[in-house]
Image (cartoon, helix red, strand yellow):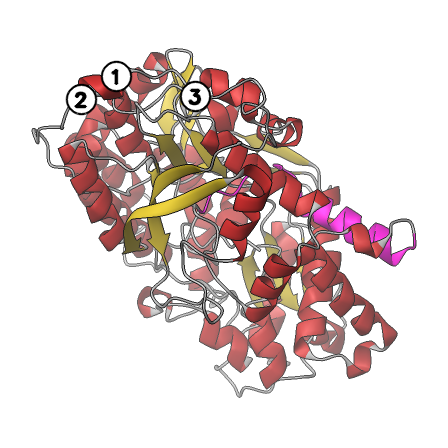
Amino acid sequence: MKKIISIAAVSMMSFGILAGCSVGSSSSEDTDTKTIATKEDLKPFGKYKETVTYTVGKSTPGIAKLPPGQTYEENAYTKYLKETLNIQSKNKFEAQDGDAYKQKVSMAVASGDLPDIMAVDAATLRQLVDNDLIADLTDVYKSSASDYVKDMYDSYDGRALDAATFDGNLMALPSTQNANIPTMLWLRQDWLDKLGLKGPKTVDDVEKILTEFVQKDPGGNGKGNTVGLALAPSIGGMYGSLFQADNILQTYHSFPRQWIEQDGKVVYGSITKETKQGLGKLADWYKKGLIDPQLAVRKSIEDLVIGGQTGAYFGPWWTPDYPLNSAKQKIPNAEWAPYIISKDGSGTITAYTQNPASEFYVVRKGFKHPEVLPKLVSALDDKLRREDRNYQPVVDFIKFGGDRGAPVNIMVNFNDATAQMYENINAAIEGKKDPNTLSLDDLSSYQKITDYLKDPTKADANQWSAYNSRMVAGKLMAETKINEVNPVFFGQTKSMKLKWANLTKLEDEAFLKIVTGEKDLDYFDKFVENWKKTGGTEITKEVSEAIKEK
């Protein structure tokens, strides 16, 4: 399962490439971009007669987690790819996720000595395109990506591939981020039952429940020790963290940290009048004692949730896996349930969509087999996932808990993958689908869920979390009607490199001061004025121009 820890719309990943640094040029041999593959080789699952060796920039976890005797170049996944396509990876460089990997990419780009395939962020992709260092994948995507992979990309209505397209040419294959909306309000159901309260549908309903939780202390924490709504200002503000207040703000059509289109113009969502209104509601709740009084210094809310000090927070569908799994282990009789909060109580919500392309995989210009990338993606995200899901070496690798066996970490999925997960598992539970046709991950969840359903009172925390994430929250994901707001920009402009960190700090401090009452609501207008003066206006202009260029 892929967890999304932060939904910050403006990617601030930078590979440390200094302005003005020279970019190495390709040799004359490398300027030839035509593949030497045969018609049979170009087929998505066509197996090469002679082994094709390709180099990769390998991103690794902090501590290698591989079965005994396996390496990043020789493991269950590379064995599968060798048997299926007759391709073999060699690591041009290995580096740990984060700064170490970014530095390696920076050095490769600066020298022009690129691996055949590597992952980059949006800013580096643009630089590689501008300096003509990577292959045009338009034709090999058409010939060598499977129909299933194309269907997955198409489920994003063009947004995923558009992010990798320049002047009509597809220059990379993106890893996709499937929809994780709607975020849900998770409540202690046993507290609701104890107080005789119904589940909420509107913001006003939530306010009444938080008031009851704080005043009547259903968890027995002691007077003044029960937190109403748990929020933490870490990772880009209260609305940018894992457990966020986006649900409340979106009922006001407020979309902080998102570049949106409003009245035909590009607008930064944090400076709109709707955001001011939403902050006013949060400030009112804080003043009434309904929001964590330690909000300003709270690093994260996990301890509050796990320790039973709070009964309310906003989180994604998978939150039963963490932190609720840990909360359930510590307080076995705690019951949590998700609810959808809408403006009018109809259950239909407005929510912004996240960046559909989380990172980009590029092919070095001059590599004689650029089709290897779409073929590799097709083998891993189509054939292995569906037709060969019982391939024993990979099954054993997963059971061991191995990590990063695949040569590249590209993950392509349907935009509604979570809803599909629920529908497939539910069909298997109802006897309408053979469980053995489920994916490896879904089959594992199915087994835990069926064990849970045999006797919920005897279920362990893992069975409880599998049921509540995949079946309860998954059902809400599948059935909630969403009016989607699609942000129009996820990249990094020239001025952002120099000014965005200061603007983000300015925003975080202003919002926190308003919510905690250090400043009144009208201070928001002063914040907007300062934001514009210190680079916001210039960046907004650059974003508008960047959108036109695409």
- Disc 2 secondary structure class: loop
Q: How many marks?
A: 3
Residue 331's disc number: none
Residue 31's disc number: 1
- Disc 3 secondary structure class: loop
* Label 2 Cα neighbours within 10 Å, binned few <14 / some 14-19 / many ≥20: few
For the residue pair 505 and 306, the one nearer the viewer reads as 306
Q: Residue at x 61, y 54 (%)?
A: 184
Tags 2 and 1 in contact by the CB under 8 Å rule? yes
* Residue, disc 2: 27
- Disc 1 secondary structure class: helix
Q: Above or below — where is 189 with respect to 417?
A: below
Label 3, label 2: how many angstroms apart (C-alpha)? 20 Å
Residue 416: x %, y % from top left: 65, 39
* Label 3 Cα neighbours within 10 Å, binned few <14 / some 14-19 / many ≥20: many
Q: Say whether residue 449 is visible.
A: yes
Tell me where residue 436 sits by quadrant: bottom right
Q: Mark 3 against mark 1, which lies toward the viewer?
A: 1
- Mark nearer the N terminus (3 vs 1): 1
Tell me where residue 166 sits by quadrant: top left
Looking at the rendering, the stretch of residues picked out in magenta corresponds to 409-431
Q: Above or below — where is 248 with respect to 355?
A: below
Label 3, label 1: how many angstroms apart (C-alpha)? 15 Å
416 is within the stretch colored magenta: yes
Residue 234: x %, y % from top left: 34, 59
Which amino acid lies under the numbered mark 3 shown in the image of this protein? Leu
